[in-house]
Amino acid sequence: MYPDLYKGLNLRPEDLTAYDSPFINFEGKTVMPKGHIRLPIQTGLEVVEVNFIVVDAYSPYTAIVARPWIHALEAVSSTLHQKVKYLSRGQVEEIHGDQAMTRQCMVAAILHRSQAKSSAPGNL
């Protein structure tokens, strides 16, 4: 979970549980998480609880959900088709990816990375 979502949910530092394992961000830098929190995610009619690790780092995304969410939902994902399918109340439900939004996030991340490099000390 990234800062915009953390602040948008009005979470406080005392809401977090300690999390000591560092991450490598998309720019290859080490980031220490602020902590983690378990929150419900509603997908269609289904609600599953997922642990979110809170990091104070730039990202065009608000949060990244992955295997724990997929497993909790008992879903099947296809990155090729940009879909997630899961069973809900006896019917197969689908979540479709948004290729345009994915592209916008990738472009934003690349632009942020190039701006960060150009403003780094020694690049003046």
Image (tube, rainbow, N blue to C red):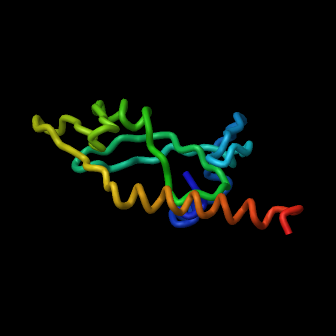
Please state if 47 lies on the left or on the right of 94 as rendered. Answer: right
State the residue lying farthest toward the front: 124
Residue plotted at (43% across, 33% down): 67
State the residue lying farthest toward the left: 90
For the image, the number of numbered tags is: 0
Name the residue nearer the viewer: 74 or 11.
74
Name the residue nearer the viewer: 14 or 94.
94
Please state if 22 lies on the left or on the right of 41 as rendered. Answer: right
Please state if 6 lies on the left or on the right of 48 as rendered. Answer: right
Q: Quadrant of residue 37?
A: top right
Residue plotted at (23% across, 50% down): 44
Q: Return the x and y of residue 100 as percentages of the image width and height.
A: 35, 60
Q: Quadrant of residue 29?
A: top right
The C terminus lies in quadrant: bottom right
Q: Return the x and y of residue 27 as percentages of the image width and height.
A: 67, 48
State the residue lying farthest toward the right: 122
Compared to residue 115, the image places residue 51 above or below, namely above
Q: Return the x and y of residue 90 as percentages of the image width and height.
A: 10, 35
Q: Return the x and y of residue 63 as percentages of the image width and height.
A: 49, 52
Residue plotted at (75% across, 65% down): 118
